[in-house]
Image (cartoon, rainbow, N blue to C red):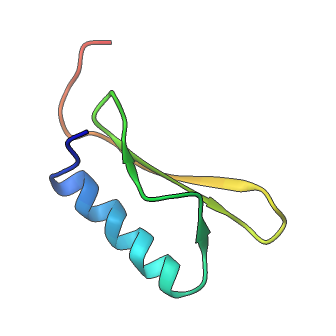
Amino acid sequence: MNIQGRNFEAIMGSHQELSSLGVVFNGLPEQQPCGGVLATLRVPAGNELQLVQQSTVDHDL
């Protein structure tokens, strides 16, 4: 999978910053088929939150 561009850089920066503060992620940010980027993290209560960086490219859905 080709992960590159501003979307990935923005969410990867957030991933690195939050990881350095002790936030636990389920893995590295992943590019989605629609072109956006998604990262999933766990909060202390055990729930999951997702960081989403929307694609800057228009896609036909």
Instruction: Report x, y in % for residue 33.
Output: 33, 28
Residue 39 relative to residue 13: left or right: right
Q: Nearer the viewer, residue 2 or 49?
A: 2
Front in this rendered view, residue 24 or 50? 24
Q: Quadrant of residue 29?
A: bottom left
Query: Where's residue 3, x and y in %?
Result: 23, 48
Q: Residue at x 43, y 69 (%)?
A: 15
Q: Position of residue 21 (x, y in %)?
A: 55, 87
Q: Is residue 32 left or right of residue 25?
A: left
| Closer to us: 55 or 1 | 1
Vertical position of residue 19 compared to residue 32: above or below: below
- Residue at 25% of width from left, 52% of height from top? 7
Res. 8 image quadrant: bottom left
Work out which residue is located at the far right of the displayed protein and give it. 45
Q: Going by the picture, which residue comes out furthest to the top? A: 61
Quarter of the image where the N terminus is located: top left
Q: Quadrant of the C terminus?
A: top left
Left/right placement of residue 17 relative to residue 24 reads: left
Q: Is residue 37 left or right of residue 27?
A: left
Total numbered circles: 0
